[in-house]
Image (cartoon, coloured by chain):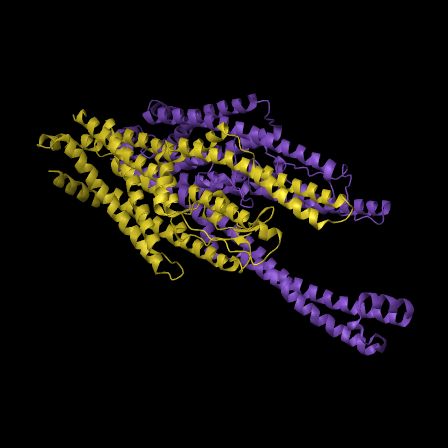
Chain colours: A purple, B yellow
Amino acid sequence: MFRTLVLKEIHNHILSFRFVVTSLLLLIVVPATVLVLTNDYVRQLDDYSRRQVEIERYLERYAHFNRLGNIVQPTQPPVPFMTLIRGLSADVDMSAFDNDPLPVVFPLLDLTFIVAILFSLAALVFTYDSVSGEREDGTLKLMLANGLPRAKILLGKIVGGMATLLIPFLISTAVGLFIILLNPRVDWKGADFGALGGIFLGIVVYLGLFTALGTLISTRHRSSASSIMTSLFVWVLAVLVVPNLSPYAASFLRPAPSSTKVNREVFRLTQDERDVLGRRLSGEKTAAVLKDHPVLAGIERMSEKDIKNTMMKDPLFAKAYSVYRKAGQEGWDEANAMQSAKAKVLQDDLDRKEKAQTGLAILLSMASPLADFTYLATDLSNTGMRNQRQFRALSGGWNQAYWKYSERRMDELKKANPTADVWNIAADVHDMPRFAYKEEDLAGRLKGTLPAFAVLAGLALAAFWGAYFSFRGYDAR
Amino acid sequence: MIGTIVKKEISANLLSYKFFVVILLASVLIFTSLFVMARDYKARLADYQINKPAVGDATAVLPPNPLSILAKGLDESMARSIGVNVTGFDVQSGQKSGNVVYAFFPAPDFVYVVKLVMSLVALLFGFDQISREKENGTLKLMLANSVSRASLMAGKWIGNYLSLAVPFTLVTLLGIALIGLDPAIRLSAGHLGRLALLMALSLVYIALFLSLGLLVSALTQRSASSLVVLLFLWAGLVFILPNLGTLLARQIVTVPSTKALSEKRQQIWTSEILMVYSKNGEWNGQAWNERRISMNREFDRLEEDYRRQAARLVRLSKTINRISPAAGFIYAATDIAGTGIGEDNRLKQDIIRYKNQILADLIGEKRPYPAFRYQYRPMGQVLAEGALIDIAWLLAAVILVFGAGASVLKRYDVR
């Protein structure tokens, strides 16, 4: 019986006008997007390898330690999944003067966007009249008169609706995948297919959520005209409003100090104020030394040269002078330590508050299925927040290796040529550690996306239960 | 006769569930958006007070634009603090928040609400005007009276437009008035003029979608199918076309990444420094100053090349995107607010000109440097440089779509 119900739904939908429109739209938009994104990915790949070659060329000819760090900054190579999903890699680079204004005005189109916006809208359009429409047509009465349990009818409707929507989607994505895999420049690995599987699971749950939601809304209304209004109202809030407002709401609820202000304050503490304090502390300490060592009298007025000469002649002076120098340095060290501690408090406070704010923003946005799906898809495809963290960790590791290497190399250069300015002479750096980007392994990604997946599944279940209870009490007349 | 139809439409709307839901949604969204973006503006204004260059600094910083509350556009990029030196620009990007969630979703400003939500709302007002009346059988009755189909269409259009535009205008004006009460947000007479134009543009944009709703309603026999067509049409026009257009333009014009540009600049620096050192083993200040001038020229050439390509890309994707009224609306709205691509481009050119103007001072380190000043393009120029085309195209689309709707209704089978 259940099969009949599902088949009936699928038949109804497949013959409907909205199915034709949805299928056409998906069949055009998904392959077109994939085609364009794949070409764009290949371009980025070319740009990246050209840049790497250029860097190596420079290292060969002009490497010197003064500017080496500016040349070999770690950069993120394009990942093969960017043929489907762009995520944060499409974010605008604000650090360059010539930044590209277009993505700010119109965010790029990718699979996440198509699913999150078009697919959810399609799911609601398919289901808004599933109950109220059948009541209006009078078929709901007939169906119930057959002694069918309501739970079965409802489940049949939801499963049928989902299946009908998944068919054109799967076909269009298969065409898209075909385009990707046919391109010899795109190298998808096993983990990518695993991640794609995870994303598909997310898509199914996301679709199930909106199908159940549409059915729930349909059971709350007598007429399909008003159920579409409510559906669109809910859709606008969940998809277009809640995620966009969440970071602003979080900044209101968990304010963080402005980073501009903190940076300015840190600069003042560790530069201007440090100088004043350092001068005072080292003055106090050296004054004490001067009192204990009368041999140093008049040292403030002596030139470097005089001091050097006197030290050669007078060992007592030399000894006292080293105490004096040490006291002065101690004063400055103390000032540095005190001021950096103060700056660290500010910096830590900013970091902590920004982290708390980001956490809250993520939490708030997760009320929206669109945000859940976006986090899930971008994290699984290595274009999201997890990848940012991964990249930062790898950069940190590379930085340490780089510093160790440069210290060792400079020591070697100094040994070979003691009078040379080792910062500014040409250096052979062919054995320098190169930054190597590595994608996070699939298991870690899957584990990391569990919360988003759980919320999505929870929302879907809640919508389903809501629909069930609401349908149980639905007046079919 | 039209008057009666208008009155009937308005009273029917006022009593409907649709009207209630839609106006509630629009009001809540517009108020929330204005409140949230005003807070964002004030935070950026406070940052500007800290970043403001001291007298004699060669730094270009614009205060945030108060109209960015309604149309944020590129304002965050335009209000960056950009230090100018001999060999280029030192961009302080630290003003951006560490909160990564901002990067995922576009800013919910007034223009965003109008572009997405108000257009959807306008469609919902129009989608069942003809087909629903047919389904209910009232269309026959109406046409049995001596009313022409053209005036029926006009009456329906005016009645629905008024019941949508009047609450929308009132809510927006109230929101802007509330913002205007905030002493931190100073709106000049020029800003108010731009606001009025922005409001008018939004009303034209809404009118287009209402006409589109009426047209499709007259093309279909059932209101359910009219809605489906309209929703997908809307998604295509508002989401897909403008975003795909930007990607499509990128297929045609190749622009090197900005990353490649900045890396190149670092590389040239590096080789130059090594060369100045190795000539006589010691730092040569005279040679360095000369090299800095030639480096400046080399960087300018590199960037000019990049900028020419980037400008082509922007022009092309603007042209492609104009197929979608949503893109035209965004271009015109951000241009009017002074946060658009045209203004950003002008600002960048001015900063480059400023750098070249004070180049001699910079090399000789002759402080104090003259301050950077920027004048937003006057309204006339904004209109002449593109906004007028967008507005005219939107208006033409409204007339075309309405005309098409009226002519389709002439042949509509009312049975």
Q: Position of residue A376 (x, y in %)?
A: 52, 39
Please state, as top left, top right, bottom left or bottom right, where the C terminus of chain A lies in the image.
Answer: top left
Query: For the N terminus of chain A, which image quadrant?
Result: top left
Which residue lies at the image location 48% right of the left edge and 36% below the top edge? B311
Decide if residue A257 is on the left or right side of residue A400.
Answer: left
Nearer to us in this view, B251 or A368: B251
Q: Position of residue B333 (x, y in %)?
A: 36, 43
**Residue A474 seen in render:** no
- Whether residue B192 is visible here, answered yes or no, is yes
Q: Nearer the viewer, residue A233 or A148?
A: A233
**Where is B309 relative to B357, above or below?**
above
Residue at the (20%, 40%) spot, across then down: B158
A383 in relation to B94, above or below = above
* Residue B409 image-quadrant placement: top left
Image: B93 above or below B332: below
Say left or right for B330 vs B226: right
- Residue A370 appears at what percent x and percent y? 45, 40
Q: Is residue A385 above or below residue B211?
A: below
- Could you tell me which residue is drawn at 70 percent across and 46 percent down? B287
